[in-house]
Amino acid sequence: MQLSFKKANRVSKNPSLDLELSVQELSAQTHPGQKKYWAMYSSWFERVVTDPNWMLVPIDDHLFHRGDGVFEALKWTAGRVYLIDQHLARLRQSAARISLDVRWADHEVKVLIEKCLNAGRVQHSTETEAMIRIFVSRGPGNFSVNPYDSVGSQLYIIVTSFQALTEEKRKVGVSLGASALMSKSLDWAPYKTCNYLPNVMLKKEAVDCGVDFMVGFDAKGFMTESATENVVIVSQRNELLKPKKGFILQGTTMNRVFTLAQHFVQQGILSRIHEEDISIDMLRGAKEVMVLGTTLDVLAVTTFDGQKVGSGIPGPITNKLQGILLADQLKY
Ligand SMILES: Cc1ncc(COP(=O)(O)O)c(C=O)c1O
């Protein structure tokens, strides 16, 4: 698939630095996607803004020109930010990986998220769910690669409308393909840094191949993950299996589901819950396969590489796990 620009390059009619005119022009420049942007906090401006045109990041922030930063994506649902502590803990682990100073305490980040939600809700009062993205950047300084050139890390929080998955996908499940691309290395896969180009390429591969998701494999041929989702299986022996730590991001959804699923082991619905190397043959022979993540919760994979998974419809364990996760979101 060819990537194409939707809009011709626009050159300002007023290239001189007339601030007032620039502000007018900027305010007039909109695109439909912006309707979903609720609010943004920027530590650089020390403000929460709701006008999408002012949701800006300095171009000399090393996040922009080097991908030097970390991020998290969280869901606001049932009046709460689901699994917020787990997300903030992972944000700090990712930041520690690149020696990035998160200058804000968790309680301060939570207050700022609440401020964004409150500001955004004025215009989006009928919406009951939202996505929150937190970015901690190396900060502005110059255009070098040197992280020590920054004046200090910055925090950007952006709240947008939640894009629910179509009911159809929930009912019939999704397709998964085997990626031909090399999975992210052990050095980077467990961290949510702003260098997501391998993930971008994995998603592009899925779109180009006409499947919903692609799953990667490591050098030994063991299953890793999808672009922004974890993949887990139910074996023929009714084991719920996830890949070993290392070549995957430890998804907050996957880990929560695995904790909640203990209940099904006690009930004898699952024989055990385990973390192990999953080969492509195990994936092919699985009773059920599912993708998990903050935006889609638990979703049944009903075809892998063009072949039916199990009987080709969402399996009972996937449905149960989806149910238990939704119940957890309501009471959390
Ligand atoms: C690479 C990758 N794997 C898995 C996930 C799922 O993680 P979570 O359940 O915390 O959303 C994500 C989330 O964005 C991701 O980026």
Image (cartoon, grey):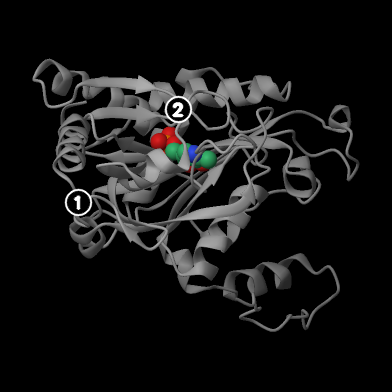
Q: Is residue 186 above or below residue 143?
A: above
Which mark, residue 64? none
Percent coordinates x, y for residue 265 in the rendering? 17, 19
What percent of the width, then of the height, locates residue 150?
Answer: 83, 32
Mark 2 CB lies closer than 8 A to ligand 1: yes
Residue on which the image places disc 2: 87
Indicate left or right for 42 with 312 as reference.
right
Query: Quadrant where the C terminus lies?
Result: top left
Secondary structure at badge 1 equals loop
Measured Cα–Cα span from mark 2 to mark 1: 28 Å
Q: Nearer the viewer, residue 59 or 214?
A: 214
Q: Quadrant of the N terminus?
A: bottom right
Residue 314 numbered mark, or none: 1
Q: Position of residue 246 (x, y in %)?
A: 57, 25
Q: Is residue 256 above or below residue 235?
A: above
Residue 269 is left or right of residue 149, and the answer is left
